[in-house]
Amino acid sequence: MKFNRNNLIILVSIISGLLLINVLFAQQKEMLPKAKVEVISTKNPKEFKIGFIDAEKVTHNSKYLQEIYQKYEKDLTSQESSIKEQQSKYQDLSENLKKQKNILSQDEITTKQKEIDDLKYQIDEMLYKIRTDFQKKNDEFDKLLDPFYEDMKAIIVEIAERDGLSLIIDKSVVLYGVKEYDVTDEVVSKLNKIYDEGKTYGKLSKEPAKN
């Protein structure tokens, strides 16, 4: 789960900074991680049957994923609000100075310009911190999500072995499928059971396979 933050490397000006941060937040919201589903094959199937899973539905119905997303969304909203407030203040000060230049003394102009420059520096620092925080959150998400996906895969394999499914694929590539072979609801139920019981994800995938 990697985020694209290359556009924040060079902060050309406060105006470009405003545009970049809006793009950044939009990208982060679009790139909230979706459930990863692999093509899984079972051992020695009695007959060739293909099951399918709706990864998007797993994402929207997993209590664990939604908790992580909501926390992430809250952090994004807080940072976005803070940076926009400062940028708005910067623009107001700059416009006011431009309008008043002809009636202000040189000392007053110098004082106001310093205030504007200091604010711009603060905004640039905030933008840098946001970029750094995103990298940190990205690493944290990997640690939080990987055990979840490992257990998800273990559950899918367990269902496939039990029901004699030869393959389980993502619903997005299925043109037609019998409801009987849709394992989505059961996968969500089992994943949410782990969450409801307060257990740690990642343990199920380490349990020995049942014969």
Image (cartoon, rainbow, N blue to C red):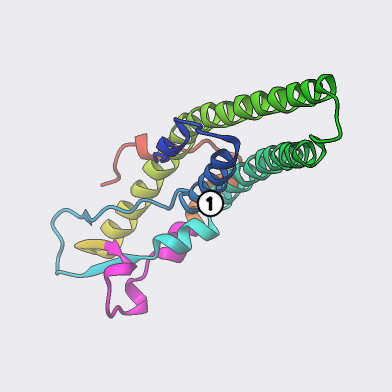
User: Magenta stretch containing residue 183, yes or no?
Assistant: yes
**Nearer to us in this view, 59 or 199:** 59
Q: Is mark 1 on a helix, strand or loop?
A: helix
State the residue at coordinates (83%, 19%): 107
**Nearer to us in this view, 140 or 156:** 140
Judged left or right of residue 90, residue 210 is left
Q: In which quarter of the image is the N terminus?
A: top left
Task: Using the image, determine if residue 43 lies above or below residue 72.
Answer: below
Residue where numbered disc 1 is placed: 26
User: Magenta stretch containing residue 136, yes or no?
Assistant: no
> In the image, what residue type sits under mark 1?
Ala
Residue 140 spot, x, y in % from top left:
50, 30
Quarter of the image where one finds residue 159: bottom left
State the residue at coordinates (77%, 21%): 110
Residue 180 spot, x, y in % from top left:
35, 76
**Nearer to us in this view, 133 or 192:** 133
Residue range highlighted in magenta:
169-188
Judged left or right of residue 83, residue 12 is left
